[in-house]
Image (cartoon, rainbow, N blue to C red):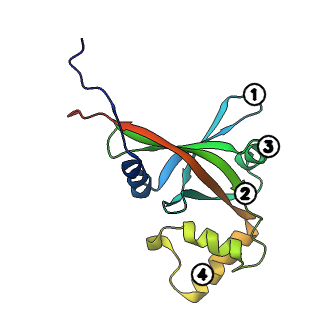
């Protein structure tokens, strides 16, 4: 018998809140070899749609991997090292933003945290133009499963 506490599974609403409370996580995609490819990514969580959105460029390895195998997971650490959430699902990749202010560019703008978004119209236009120059896409992870735990310890 152990005297240490066991991890407790977190309910769906707590997992969703954990995703909403963080901005960065580790995205896992699948290499051809079957090994995971891990990347730290900024994301935006839409709990109502159960979609995670990421901004990336069209030429990234993760984009090629997800076009081949759309299964992916995002691991997010909680407020302490004893809690985490994992969101699993299938990814889809948008078209490349081609014209400043197009639908993809606007969706990418929404991934940027409110506090970091361009405020002035000229700043926004420059930002949207930069997204086009960088060949940015939206990576959407449609979450089909959430799981995670917390361990109630004082550490």
- State the separation of the CA atoms marked 4 and 1: 41 Å
Instruction: Give the mark nearest the N terminus, 1 or 3.
Output: 1
Instruction: Give the mark nearest the N terminus, 4 or 2.
Output: 2
Q: Which residue is mark 4?
A: 124
Residue displayed at 41% across by 40% down: 84
Q: Is residue 60 visible?
A: yes
Instruction: Give the mark nearest the N terminus, 4 or 3.
Output: 3
Whether pointer 4 and pointer 3 mark residues with C-beta atoms closer than 8 Å, the reply is no
Residue displayed at 39% across by 56% down: 21
Q: Which residue is mark 2?
A: 93
Q: Residue furthest top?
A: 1
* SS category of the residue bearing label 4: helix
x, y (%) of residue 75?
50, 42
- State the separation of the CA atoms marked 2 and 3: 11 Å
Q: Which residue is mark 1?
A: 33
Q: Which residue is mark 3?
A: 68
State which quarter of the image contains the N terminus.
top left
* SS category of the residue bearing label 1: loop
């Amino acid at each position: 018998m152990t005297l240490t506490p066991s991890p407790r599974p977190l309910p769906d609403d707590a997992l969703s809140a954990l995703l909403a409370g963080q901005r960065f996580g580790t995205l896992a995609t699948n290499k051809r070899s079957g090994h995971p490819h891990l990347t730290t990514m900024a994301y935006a969580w839409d709990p109502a749609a159960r979609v995670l959105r990421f901004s990336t460029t069209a030429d990234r390895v993760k984009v090629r991997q997800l076009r081949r195998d759309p299964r992916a997971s995002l691991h997010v650490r909680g407020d302490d090292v004893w809690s985490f959430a994992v969101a699993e699902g299938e990814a889809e990749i948008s078209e490349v933003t081609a014209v400043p202010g197009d639908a993809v560019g606007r969706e990418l703008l929404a991934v940027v945290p409110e506090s970091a978004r361009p405020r002035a119209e000229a700043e926004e236009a420059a930002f949207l133009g930069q997204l086009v120059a960088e060949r940015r896409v939206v990576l959407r992870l449609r979450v089909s499963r959430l799981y995670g735990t917390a361990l109630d310890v004082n550490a």
